Image (cartoon, rainbow, N blue to C red):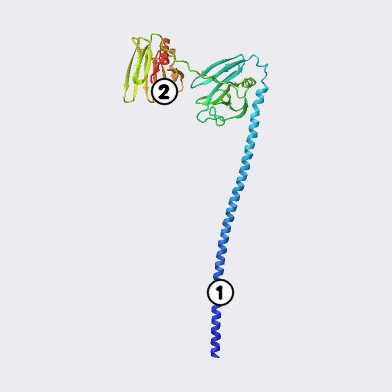
Amino acid sequence: MHMENEINIESQNQSDSSNLINHDLSVNFSKKSRSLNTVFFAVLLIITGVAVFFGYKYYQLLNQTKTLKEFKDAALKVNEVITSTLTPAVTSVLDSSSIADWETYENSSLGFKIKYPPSIEVEKEFDDANNRATSFSGENLKFEVMLRSKNSGISLDSYFYMDSPVSRKINLLGKSASVYELADGYCDGPGCSEPSITVVTENDLELFHISFFGDAELSKLEQQVLGTFEFIDKTSMTIDKQPNPPAGWIAHNFPLKSLIIYTPAKWQSSAENFADIPSTLLRFWEAGDEKNSTIQLNITNNWDNMGIGSNYTYFTVAGDIQAYRIDPPKMEEKTLDRYQTNFYFERKGQVYSLLCVHNWMKANIETCEKMLQTMKFTD
């Protein structure tokens, strides 16, 4: 009996141990299951978040694409409206009978022609390395046609005229043209210029500017003039042959500077080199009249202290070199002890500064000009 109880107790202990082990395994399995569930839900949450994020971005992209398309479509419609605003106005006022007596201006070098009323005159013509334009002026009408090369990456779409953006677009001669409306003129410094409207279009490698001055809106007459504008074939630009020195002039040869300068027979010259600057000073003068006829040519390697400013014109030297020309006040103003004209130009890294004392004596001015026109470089 006692042994039977011990066996029962032992069996019960074994059963209890087995239950305890099964309980521990169940607990461990439950913990592991909960851990796996946590990881699973975390991964699922991350995947869901990524999907939501990219879905939202895709939605935004679709909206942006739609908005961009709508914007482009709207821009095209606006451009069509803008393009049609001036062309009908120009063409509608073009009546062959109303311009039958108009003059025709044709410039084969610049590549355009235009008609204008008989009361208008050609005021100025420029065709050099710095200015390419023709201006017209008369009663109730003043306008200009000016060319600018499309260099340095300039294009019609990115072009700002007189620091002003495009006011509107039009169609001119089947080409796109930009209109710049300066109702208050161009303001720079203390004042502003008169109002102007400029139409800019392009042909080949040139930007053509047709500017009308004095009006904030194109008048009927100005529209008629604009409607007669045409492109024509260009002819090759020719440079006039360098003039020969006047009879009796003598040559002053400066081999170190590869330079020959001609002067009247009585003129003398000298040359002085300055190693510290470095520069070379050439002096020319008429024997016995050094006060009124002194010419100095300074040759250096930079533009320092030239003082050109903005009050200058252009003058051609040595056949094809454009020089800045600065004239003094007129003689009657009596503000200086002596009156001189300065010329500045650059060639092969050398800067040339010529000082011509003339005291407004016509013969001396002409001598200076002829010296510059006939000077020659030998290199």
**If you read the primary sequence from the N terminus, does the residue marked by circle 1 or circle 2 appear first?**
1
**Coordinates of residue 355 in the picture (x, y in percent):** 39, 17
Which of the 4 image quarters holds residue 79?
top right
Q: Where, quadrant-wise, is the C terminus in this rendering?
A: top left
Comparing 336 with 377, the one in front is: 377
The crowding category of the residue bearing disc 1, from other C-alpha atoms within 10 Å (few below 14, some 14 to 19, many at least 20), is few
Q: Secondary structure at mark 1?
A: helix
User: Which residue is drawn at the image coordinates 63% and 35% (left, top)?
Assistant: 75
Tell me where residue 360 appears, x and y as whole percent: 42, 12
Q: Which residue is mark 2?
A: 346
Q: CA distance from mark 1 to mark 2?
A: 103 Å
Q: Residue at x 62, y 41 (%)?
A: 67
Q: How many marks?
A: 2
Three-letter amino acid code at disc 2? Glu
Along the line of sight, the residue nearer the viewer: 153 or 333: 153
Q: Residue furthest bottom?
A: 1
Picture layout, residue 3 above or below residue 44: below
On screen, residue 338 versus residue 234, left or right, reads left
For label 1, the residue is: 23
